[in-house]
Image: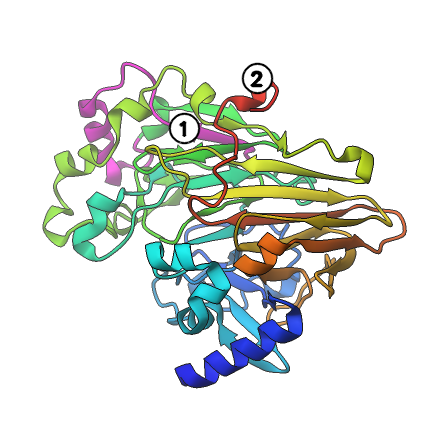
Amino acid sequence: MSRHTVEAMTGRALDAGGGILRLAPTWVPRSFLHPGRRLKLHPDDLYALGAHRGGIDERWFASTTPADNKGAPPDEGLSYVVFEGDRFTLRDAVAACGPEIIGQEMWDTCGGWPVYSKFFDNMGPIPHHLHQSAEQVASLGRLGKPEGYYFPPQLNYTGNNFPHTFYGLEPGTTKQDVRGCLERWQDGDNGILDLSRAYRLKPGTGWLVEPRLLHAPGSLVTYEPQWGSDVFAMYQSLVEGRSVPWDLLVKDVPEDRRGDLDYLVDLIDWEANLDPSFRDNHYLEPIPVADTSGEGYVDRWVVYGTVEGRQWFTAKELTVAAGVRAVVEDSGAYGLTVMQGRGAIGGLSVHSPSMIRFGEMTEDELFVTDGTARSGVVFENQAGHEPLVVLRYFGPDVNPDAPQVGDHRRGGR
């Protein structure tokens, strides 16, 4: 599809939607993980892409970032705009109409929509791993990745096999300790988790995770705003009896360094991983944006904080009571997913489905453009009894008024 055609179609879709685009579900498999079966994807479709690709355990939102999966088609991970029976990627829409969609400032600074969010849903834990910094993968033409977590209560009706996450390394751990784990990669369990500490996960809370920080996410469904990258390095050789290929440790490492154990050890940010106050510096609890409960709705910050002094992304959870109509103004564009209930957002009908077939269109995901977000969007709960609950995430530097990590202990900001 030509750029001119995409530009024209995007313009018509924006006009019809009042500055809001409707997006189709984007499903992503992971060959090394076991799906947790809580993303509302029909059980018959968990392996819709073939057993060789692995089960579908992720759904990506408002993504212009392709998934870095072996054997994946080039558009895996990309979100599609759907309008009048036509489909085109959000990435192409932003390329054609960037300032109108994401705002002139973000367009000038980033040249595109630089973030995405996703659900990941696994039966058990993910291997202990880190995401490289921008400097560490620059020579490969890739981007580093900070990320944030929020555990939505609507999907976490069961914790599955291991609702705990290992973070960092125990104080006193040495580089030689970690090097020894890498030397034991082919011996079965290389013991990397013996050097770490697990934290029990709680629905309705979250964490902020910077690059170079080891973490082994647990088995709660996780809403994960993050930078637009899919780089990682796995440091755990065996998870729940399943071996982790060495290739997943070195997939984003320069070719001439893939056997260099000292280099791999130095990918780790040792100061951050050995932080004795780790929980205080990374744990998040929701903080109300304002006192609006008397008006029938509550908007809460659920992912916030800075990494290396910069706000890379933020996320909010909006809850609108039955029969309430709320006008919500924001400071920039956002991707949106409906977690519970039904109603209308900016005049577009929305509802949270109970079951989704692979390839089926839904009415639970939208992208709200910069100007529309700033002007205010009407969220109307049309359900007779249950709340309308919506998650929305924002790009870098959009919300300078957002809280900092730890502000929940101080009663907000």
Q: Residue furthest left?
A: 256
Residue 276 among magenta residues: no
* Left or right placement of residue 357 versus residue 385 in this view: left
In the rendering, at what x and y percent does residue 157 appear?
70, 40
Whether residue 34 is situated above or below residue 173 in the rendered picture: below
Classed neighbour count for the residue bearing mark 1: other residues with Cα under 10 Å, few (<14), some (14–19), many (≥20): many
- Marks 1 and 2, how far apart at CA: 24 Å
The amino acid type of the residue labelled 2 equals Arg
In the rendering, at what x and y percent does residue 210 appear?
36, 35
In the rendering, at what x and y percent does residue 99 appear?
44, 64
Q: Write down the quadrant of residue 277 in the picture.
A: top left
Q: Start and end of the magenta stretch? A: 161-190
Question: Which residue sits at x=45%, y=71%?
Answer: 97
**In which quadrant will I find the C terminus?**
top right
The amino acid type of the residue labelled 1 equals Tyr
**In which quadrant will I find the N terminus?**
bottom left
- Residue identifier under label 1: 167
